Image (cartoon, grey):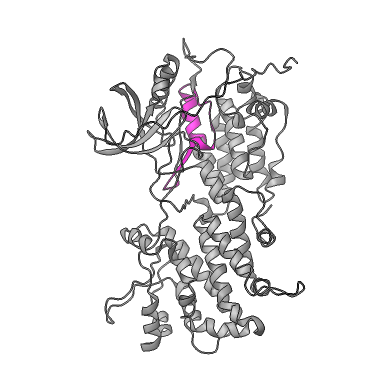
Amino acid sequence: MENPLDIPTPPVEKPRPDLPRPADLAGRTLGDFQLIRRLGSGGMGQVYLARQLSLKREVAVKILRTDLAANATALQRFQHEAEAVARVTHANIVQVYAIGESDGLHYMALEYVEGRNLRDYINRKGPPEPAVAINIMRQVSAALQRASELGFVHRDIKPENILITRKGEVKVADFGLSRCFVGDQPMNITQSGVTMGTPLYMSPEQVQGHVVDPRSDIYSFGVTCFHMMAGEPPFKGQTPFEVALQHVQNQPPALSDIRPDLSPNLCAVVHKMMAKKPEDRYQTPREMMRDLNRLRDHLPVTAASEITLTHRSAGNPAIHGMSASSMTMAMPPASTGRWWRWPVYALLVAAAGAVGAAIHWGTAPIAESKTPEAVATPTTPPPDPTKAERDLLKRLLSDGKIRSDLEVTNAVIDLALLYHRQDLADKSPEAEELRKKLPYGKAYDMFELENLRRWPALTEAQKFFKPANSREYLNLIASLGKGIALSLRDLPDESNAEFRKAMTLNQPAKVKQAAPVDLFLWKYDRWKREVADSLERNARNLGVARLEEPLNRYRGYSSKMP
């Protein structure tokens, strides 16, 4: 059947065995660059962390695969990538420092970006809040505007090529598929009629092999933004050709139906970016930035406007232009080095009265909070905690009659979440030492049974939990709390295991009887919401639509579910 849309049909590739993993070149020196360790492998070659000897700085060195270097067209494409990006200098574009050849190895030295790519961010944290999404969109738009001013089209905008640094800066990577669209002799190094790019994010004109301009990048970025906000791309298919065809024929689903919490204006911006006809889209990235600036100005100023990254692994950079399947992009989890020692508090409670001590601790702002260090001697004063922490400690350390078991039970989870936030904020040298002692963080350590039993108020509060199940009160807090803490650290399997443990505690023989976990979550709604949101986060991190029962049933309480 003849293709009515005149879309180049992809050639049938003969199956071939996977290429062997290339030798590790760590330790070698290529020109001015000493390779330190291999960071990963992509479609065009390997990437290494390296040290530029002359300037004494860390860089990322991309080495072209030897089989591709033997291909004149591929080598020309590799060189073109460096030349293009070197011209497009911008704070939101990964900078190319040098290109060269040594001992038959063709390489490119680029800016070393620590962080993760947008796909990894979405997979692990889920769709971001509107303020965060707009923040990302504005920075990518600025990069595309600069590129378009110099006459370049990226041609492969997708989540893997958008990197987010430790500080929340966004950088566009891999201009390897870009092509100059102005000048007397525009570069064309691809075979006529063959499209370049990734089908999930291609513009209709790119799919059909037509001439593209910056509006094609705006379309691809619109699809990327849809993916970022909806959690998945607008079009799916069994084959790349099937997906590409939908970009030409089908309208994307309404973003507002998937994310009703988004403003209609933000959804309208994304859909305008994805208009089928180039003339119906934004004509320049600058036009898009104007609308995004208006949206930003009407958002409430909250902490959600900042991009934050957490990951359980340490030390991995966001590799330039690599997919999440070929390399794990990660950031070291920050945690505080001033973990207060439970035995010390037990001693304070018994000897001097921890409540009185807590009341006289300082009132530093939350953003500058530090938790007390273990004291070396009884005369060493503890550092000031936050007011919120002080109030929570006061409730939990109370050894008299408590006002409310609800207040005490909620104080436990609130204190754990406070410690988790402090873990993210603390980038001190002591944090690395603490990570070795408490790999899952302070919040998780709080929920060890022996630590929970040190809170006098919890011992009193468990008497108010249904008498027949009062013995399960601390066990439920321990397992549910650990599940929440592990979910916050992006450990979905470990988190789900703790939730399963809580859901099988003292399981009743009769079906009509409520399990202790049901009674607990029914009584303490604050916990129910945190558990549900954690299960929702776990499902997204695992990349599944549903968790097994009964986890999925409890997940249904999540405030983040559409």
Q: Is residue 541 left or right of residue 61?
A: right
Q: Is residue 162 magenta?
A: yes
| Res 355 quadrant in image | bottom left
Q: Is residue 189 above or below residue 141?
A: above
Where is residue 159? Give x, y as percent.
53, 37
The quadrant of the picture occupied by the N terminus is: top right
Q: Is residue 349 above or below residue 90?
A: below
| Res 432 quadrant in image | bottom left
Where is residue 72? Give x, y as percent.
42, 14
**Foreground residue among 507 and 491:** 507
**Foreground residue among 191 and 382:** 191
* Residue at 54%, 49% in the rendered image: 124
**Foreground residue among 208 and 260:** 208
Q: Is residue 333 above or below residue 272?
A: below
Q: Is residue 250 above or below residue 471?
A: above
* Residue at 62%, 20% in the rendered image: 10
Kindly give the residue lying farthest to the front in the view shown: 17
What range is drawn magenta here?
141-168
Q: Is residue 424 magenta?
A: no
Q: Is residue 184 left or right of residue 236?
A: left
Kindly give the residue lying farthest to the left in the view shown: 54
* Residue at 68%, 71% in the rendered image: 518
* Residue at 60%, 31% in the rendered image: 201
Where is residue 513? Give x, y as percent.
74, 75
Kindly give the residue lying farthest to the right in the view shown: 512
Where is residue 185? Give x, y as percent.
46, 10
